[in-house]
Each structure stands twice: as structure tokens, then as C-alpha cells.
Image (tube, rainbow, N blue to C red):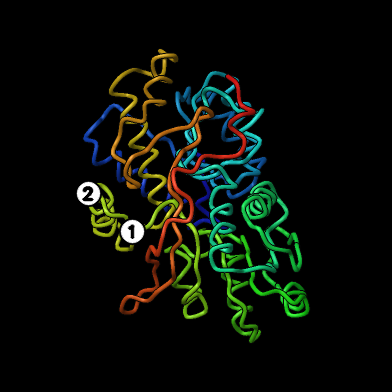
Amino acid sequence: MITTLSGGGAGLGIDVRDGFMLAIGQSGRNDIEVIIEDDQRKPDIAVQLADKMIQSEKVDVMTGIIWSNLAMAVIPSSVSQGKFYLSPNAGPSALAGKGCHRNYFNVAWQNDNLHEAAGAYANSADYNNSFILAPNYPAGQDALTGYKRMYDGELAGEVFTKLGQTDYASEIAQIRASGADSVFFFLPGGMGISFLKQYADSGINLPVVGPAFSFDQGILQAVGDAALGVVNTSQWNKDIDNGTNAAFVDTFQAEYGRLPSLYASQGFDTANLLISALKVANPGDADAFRAALEAADFNSTRGDFKFGSNHNPIQNIYAREVIKEGDVYTNKIIGVALENHSDAYAAECSF
């Protein structure tokens, strides 16, 4: 597991790690060794760690990367060397289409998916003139592409921000002057916290739509009242009604003393996919192990789970609203934005 455990975005990697290790612990298996390293959100360090994992540690399966630029630096080389990669988060379009690989499985989503759902929700809410913004890196580019793919209205503005940016005064001024009737943004981690607080302080009263990444459990407490009422899109929420999810929420909270996030659920599901495949075959028998992964015979926090032909999920994407339960900011599902949704790149993929 190579993931982000320090610096910007560390909370995301910590949640993936904790969800993953919760499932490993619950499995009762003592034959799975998990080696965990911190990529510090730096592509060069991620590449060095991947080389170490493959050359020195002789790992069979790799996982953990949060950020799409790190994924693109690590995954193509790793799978080409015969390793399996199970993504608990990053799903760049380049790995879903022509750059797909039979040993790459995304257990979370293809990057565009949650943004496509936000565009579909904007249509249902009769938004006709959205201002859209995201950081200028692969996931940010996929975000705006995804939103525009489903959104039927006009664009009041389209802006790429710097990755890691914290001051959004210029962008907020552009929103104010744009004549927009709504704002869509993808700014994960601390970027989203900074933007939402500054946006709330600006006095602009336009509705905001975004993917779960800026409204997830680990972020909401830092954002506070500025997030209340915002609709965001996610393939998971703590109130999805199935036994696996209810047990996951309870056991995660008991183990770690906090509510699980989207990222924690993805780590948990990734580990359970791995465990389900190991019951059938070892990674050394690559064809059998790959077939076991494709079967996805595990109980997911999302309910029924299945892969498309390019090893990306086919799943419901929900619209959620930020609410407050007692002193805790959280989300509740208000509807299905996209049902049994796959991705736009599968037709370009051939193994």
C-alpha cells in the first residue's frame, strides 16, 4: 500500500488505510502481509516506493494511491511488470480507456463518474448557467469533462486552479461577475475547505454542487456551517441500507473513534475484494486470480458490486445533502443521480 499519510491530503490516505486494515483484521486471515508506505503526495517518491515494493519486497498486489497524478506515475509500470493494482480511489480516464490493463482494477469509481452525476443533478435542479472550477491535474480535468458530459445548460465560466491552492479570492470575484445561477467545483482535501469558507464569507448566494470529495466526513467538520444544504454526489454514504454497510459504519466508528468517510469505505471494499479473490486463487496463478477479481464475489458497503469490461465499477451514484446530526456535520442521501452507471471510456478498452 502506497498512500498519502503526511502533508496535504493525509486524511484521505489515512482513511483508505484504516478502512483497508479493518477488513483485513475482520477476515481472520494471517497469511496476508500488508506493507504500508507514505508517498507524501509526491510522484517521485511514489515511483521510488513502487520500485522498492516490486524489486525488494516482491509484492503481489499493490493498492492505496489517492491522487491521479501519482497513479499515472506508478500504475502503468507496475501492471506491465505483472503486478495487480487495486485502486481504492484514483480513477484517471487514461487508465479506463486505451490505457487500460487487465491487471488494473478500480474499486472506487472512474474519475468522471461523480462529476457526471453532479451534472445530471444540476439538470434536475433546473440550473442553466453553471460556473465550474477544478485544479489543473488529471482528476481535475476529468472532473470538468464529466460535469459537462451530463450537464445540459450553459457555462458562465470555466477555470482551472492550481493544485494545492488555498486563496480563491480571484475565482470568487469571477463567479460574482459571471451571471451564473450555480457553482460546480471539484477541490478535494484542504483546497475544498479553503474554497467553501471563503465562498461562504463572500456573501454570494448561488447554490453549490460538487462531488463528495469536498463534502466528505473527514472534511465537513472543518468546513462547518458553510457546507450545510450543499448537494454533492457519491457512490457511498453511511445510510445506504444494507447489512454490510451498517456493520462497517458501526465497527469503523468503534475501532477508530470517528465516522467513516467515502475513502474509508473504498479501502474496506478494496480489501474485501482482495480477500474474496484470495479464497479462489493466489496471485501467482495470474489468470485464475484475475478471474476471481473480475467476479467481485464479496459483500460491498454499496450493496451489489460489479465491474465493467474495463475493470471499473458499474454502480449507482447518489445525490447527498449536507446536514447536521447533533454536533456532527454529515450527509444524507436524497436520491439517485445516476443508476447502474458505468464510464464513458470502456468501449476504448481492449485487453
Label 1: how many Cα within 10 Å (few below 14, some 14–19, many 20+): many
Q: Dividing the picture into quarters, in which one does residue 325 lie?
A: bottom left
Tell me the kind of residue under disc 1. Answer: Lys
Q: Are marks 1 and 2 in contact (CB under 8 Å)?
A: no
Q: Earlier in the sequence, mark 1 or mark 2?
A: 1
Q: Position of residue 16 (x, y in %)?
A: 43, 48
In-image side of 136 versus 307 (left or right): right
Residue drawn at (62%, 85%), measured in percent from left and top?
201
In-image side of 319 versus 25 (left or right): right
Q: Position of residue 312 (x, y in %)?
A: 50, 35
Determine the residue located farthest toward the bottom in the rendered image.
203
Q: Judge by depth and name the residue closer to the eye, 97 or 83.
A: 97
Secondary element type, mark 1: loop
Q: Position of residue 167 (x, y in %)?
A: 70, 72
Tell me the kind of residue under disc 2. Answer: Gly
The quadrant of the rendering that contains the C terminus is top right
Label 2: how many Cα within 10 Å (few below 14, some 14–19, many 20+): few
Residue drawn at (46%, 70%), measured in percent from left and top?
220
What residue sits right under mark 2 in the picture?
243
Residue 240 sits above or below residue 346 on the image: below
Q: Judge by depth and name the residue closer to the eye, 134 or 72.
A: 134
Q: Position of residue 185 (x, y in %)?
A: 63, 64
Q: Dividing the picture into quarters, in which one does residue 290 lie?
A: top left
What residue sits right under mark 1 in the picture?
238
Residue 251 sits above or below residue 315 on the image: below
Secondary element type, mark 2: helix
Residue 84 sits above or below residue 128 on the image: above
Residue 81 sits above or below residue 330 on the image: above
